[in-house]
Image (cartoon, rainbow, N blue to C red):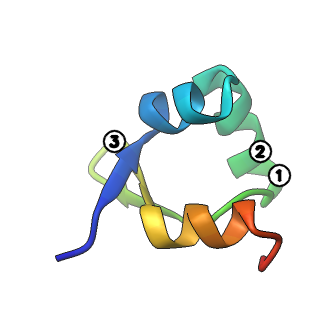
Amino acid sequence: MKTFLTQEQLGQRWCISPKTLRQWRLLGWGPQVHLVGSTCLYDLDAVEAWEGGAQ
Protein backbone atom coordinates (compact mmCIF):
# COMPACT_ATOMS: atom_id res chain seq x y z
CA MET A 1 0.00 0.00 0.00
CA LYS A 2 1.32 3.45 -0.94
CA THR A 3 2.04 6.09 1.65
CA PHE A 4 0.94 9.66 1.04
CA LEU A 5 1.82 12.93 2.76
CA THR A 6 -0.52 15.87 3.12
CA GLN A 7 0.62 19.33 2.15
CA GLU A 8 1.13 20.13 5.83
CA GLN A 9 3.20 16.98 6.44
CA LEU A 10 5.42 17.66 3.43
CA GLY A 11 5.83 21.26 4.52
CA GLN A 12 7.03 20.07 7.94
CA ARG A 13 9.38 17.55 6.32
CA TRP A 14 10.94 20.24 4.12
CA CYS A 15 10.64 23.09 6.67
CA ILE A 16 8.53 25.22 4.31
CA SER A 17 4.99 26.50 4.57
CA PRO A 18 2.00 24.84 2.92
CA LYS A 19 1.52 28.15 1.07
CA THR A 20 4.91 27.69 -0.59
CA LEU A 21 3.92 24.17 -1.67
CA ARG A 22 0.69 25.59 -3.15
CA GLN A 23 2.69 28.16 -5.11
CA TRP A 24 5.09 25.49 -6.37
CA ARG A 25 2.15 23.30 -7.42
CA LEU A 26 0.67 26.18 -9.42
CA LEU A 27 4.05 26.71 -11.11
CA GLY A 28 4.38 23.00 -11.89
CA TRP A 29 7.41 22.57 -9.63
CA GLY A 30 7.91 19.85 -7.03
CA PRO A 31 6.82 16.23 -6.81
CA GLN A 32 3.60 15.12 -8.45
CA VAL A 33 0.50 15.91 -6.43
CA HIS A 34 -2.75 13.94 -6.28
CA LEU A 35 -5.92 15.88 -5.58
CA VAL A 36 -8.55 13.99 -3.60
CA GLY A 37 -11.48 16.36 -3.30
CA SER A 38 -9.82 19.53 -2.03
CA THR A 39 -6.94 17.67 -0.33
CA CYS A 40 -3.48 17.59 -1.92
CA LEU A 41 -1.59 14.36 -1.35
CA TYR A 42 2.02 13.65 -2.23
CA ASP A 43 3.18 10.08 -2.88
CA LEU A 44 6.08 9.40 -0.49
CA ASP A 45 7.99 7.53 -3.23
CA ALA A 46 7.72 10.60 -5.51
CA VAL A 47 8.81 12.88 -2.66
CA GLU A 48 11.87 10.75 -1.96
CA ALA A 49 12.72 10.63 -5.67
CA TRP A 50 12.43 14.42 -5.83
CA GLU A 51 14.66 14.76 -2.78
CA GLY A 52 17.21 12.51 -4.46
CA GLY A 53 17.25 14.65 -7.58
CA ALA A 54 15.41 12.15 -9.76
CA GLN A 55 12.68 14.52 -10.92
Name the N-terminal-most of marks 3 and 2. Answer: 2
Residue tagged 2: 24
At which x and y percent is residue 22? 65, 36
At which x and y percent is residue 33? 52, 61
Q: Are marks 2 and 1 in contact (CB under 8 Å)?
A: yes
Name the N-terminal-most of marks 3 and 1. Answer: 1
Query: Is residue 32 in view from this perspective?
Result: no
Q: Is residue 35 left or right of residue 24?
A: left
**Residue beneath the point at 78% across and 60% down:** 28
Q: CA distance from mark 3 to mark 1?
A: 18 Å
Residue tagged 3: 38
Q: Is residue 49 left or right of residue 36?
A: right
At which x and y percent is residue 5? 38, 48
- Image quadrant occupied by the N terminus: bottom left
Mark 2 burial class by Cα count in 10 Å: few <14, some 14-19, many 20+: few
Q: Examine the image and state in which quarter residue 21 appears.
A: top right
| Type of amino acid at the residue the image marks with label 2 | Trp
**Residue beneath the point at 26% across and 73% down:** 2
Query: Is residue 13 in view from this perspective?
Result: yes
Picture disc at residue 27 = 1
* SS state under label 3: loop
| Type of amino acid at the residue the image marks with label 1 | Leu
